[in-house]
Amino acid sequence: MNGVLAVYGKEIKLYFRSPIAYFILAVFLLGTGYFFSYNLFVSGLATMRETFQNMGLLAVILLPAVSMRLFATEYSAGTYELLATLPLAPWEVVVGKYLGALTMLGLMALGTMLDLVPLYLFGAPETTTIISGYLGFLLLGSACLAIGQLCSSLTRNQIVAALVTVSILLGFWFVGHLQSFQTVQFLRELFLNISFAWHFGEFIEGLARFESLALFVLFSAGALILNVCALEWRR
Amino acid sequence: MPHPVELHSLTKTYGERTVVDRVSFHVGQGEIVGFLGPNGAGKTTTLRMIAGYLAPTSGQVTVAGQDVVSSPATSASAIGYAPERPALYDSFDVLGYLRFVARAKRVHRADTASQIDRVVAACRLEAVAQSEVYKLSKGYRQRLGLAQALLGHPEVLLLDEPTSGLDPGQISETREVIRSFGRDHSVLLSTHILPEVTLLCDRIAILHHGRLLAIDSPSGLGAAVGRANRVELQVAPNGPPDLKDRLLDVGGVVRVDIDDRQVPCSVSCAVDSSGNVEAAIARAVSRDWELLALRRHDPSLEDVFLHYVESAA
């Protein structure tokens, strides 16, 4: 566990010693804040439902910018040679980096909780739905980061890592739309069941279903295991 | 008892290309072994396999008795590795970087500060200890790379071109660090700089096209290429014309080159290293010629290196 904590500490330092963490946090919070204010003051909707939906799409687009550097910059800067020759198991490197990225995700979620203040002051929001929405956001974000970290471990170029990750994540986000074009029942169910947007939508509605939770956990765990395999394969 | 580093028929191939070809040797306790070879000889790949960065295609590496492939974490704990291009995080400060490495090497929290102080002092990094890594000169970067390798009291130190890019003063200081570390530990260093291995190393391994051509002490290597020894003569041209034949009759002389365009004429005899051939040559020449000078020319490390590389080619 010491190895995980060493890598985690390094990652947190690296995030906050470069402007990218602040930039991503700022863009995310400005975006969600804008949509929240618009829904509240223009549409008159005093709920987090629409805000969560926008948070989900913003996460799919912005989280690849968090994950893109995780391994790609280590390769290009030559620092991976140090990581790989320190007494650290590949899984410790993968988990340490992942926890660092999850901390960024947690800070993004934490920042949006400011929106809850006016909601609770002037309305009567359903707390369980809000908790479910945040749980869904964290699970969605965890899956996005794990996929992004895997992509970053496969290339030396962080721009390539980000573009490939965005493409994959948008594919999983919108794949549910394809079900309406399918006549085969199996494909209709498949497209719906692997759709990030559909499962995240369930959480937003307050339905924290096991299937949805399992999907995001499986995607995260699968990507992290492949990430460990990718590091072993590099040797 | 196993040696700190043992290589058994170590091989690395990339597709059809063999980069390291059945290399076997060991590094003993308290021994400094120099890895010598031209660019592309396979020195860095071999060091990377010992460090656990690359997996061998076949063969085995053990460090401190642990197989590098099957027990990577245990063997890595015994290794301090400084790659040729120092692996540094530019946005860290020097002490922060060393703290990260110490933590990753599982240095006990109570010992971290004293160990960092020790390597900072040993590598003369005091002046830049608070600086960010991206602000360091090339020399300081190289020394910080060496400092991180020294953390955690590793049993084995692997250094890839440790003095590359340093000025003469820094080279001398770095050599002193390596020499003092090598008294109690095992060091394997690769370099292009021939005097460096002569000054630092107990044994020299010559690698070419991925194959280990020789490994021995500097004097042992010289003796092994004894056929390349020469005896140089200065002879007054006042005797019979069969000087060359007379010299070839001397036991141990294998080749004679005479340059008689100048006075006195210069004679170079390639001799077998066995026996005191100089006395026999002197006797043979003095009978009919005036011998003005005679000098044995032992092979330098450069001669040894070139001899092996050219023989392999």
Image (spheres, rainbow, N blue to C red):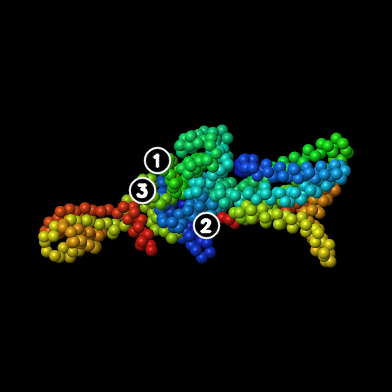
Q: Relative to A230, say whether B199 is above or below.
A: above
Q: Is residue B159 left or right of residue A20?
A: left
Circle 1 residues within 10 Å: few <14, some 14–19, many ≥20: few
What residue is shown with label 2? B56
**Numbered disc 3: secondary structure:** helix
Q: Are marks 1 and 3 on the same chain?
A: yes
- Lower position in the chain sequence, tag 1 or tag 2: 2
Marks 3 and 2 close (CB-CB < 8 Å): no
Which label lies toward us, 1 or 3?
Answer: 1
- Quadrant that contains the N terminus of chain A: top right
**Numbered disc 1: secondary structure:** helix
Mark 3 to mark 2: distance in Å? 31 Å
Mark 1 to mark 3: distance in Å? 15 Å
Q: Given the image, on which type of amino acid does mark 1 rest?
A: Gly
Which label lies toward us, 1 or 2?
Answer: 1
Residue located 71% across and 49% down the image: A62
Residue B152 coordinates in the image, percent (x, y): 52, 40
Residue located 84% across and 66% down the image: A183
What residue is shown with label 1? B169
Nearest the viewer among B76 and B85 is B85
Residue B142 coordinates in the image, percent (x, y): 48, 44
- Lower position in the chain sequence, tag 1 or tag 3: 1
Q: Given the image, on which type of amino acid does mark 3 rest?
A: Pro
Tell me if residue B27 can be seen: no
Please state the chain letter of the residue tagged with numbered disc 2 in the rendered image.
B
Mark 1 to mark 2: distance in Å? 37 Å
Residue B55 coordinates in the image, percent (x, y): 54, 55
Circle 3 residues within 10 Å: few <14, some 14–19, many ≥20: few
Please state the chain letter of the residue tagged with numbered disc 1 in the rendered image.
B
Q: Given the image, on which type of amino acid does mark 2 rest?
A: Pro
What residue is shown with label 3? B195
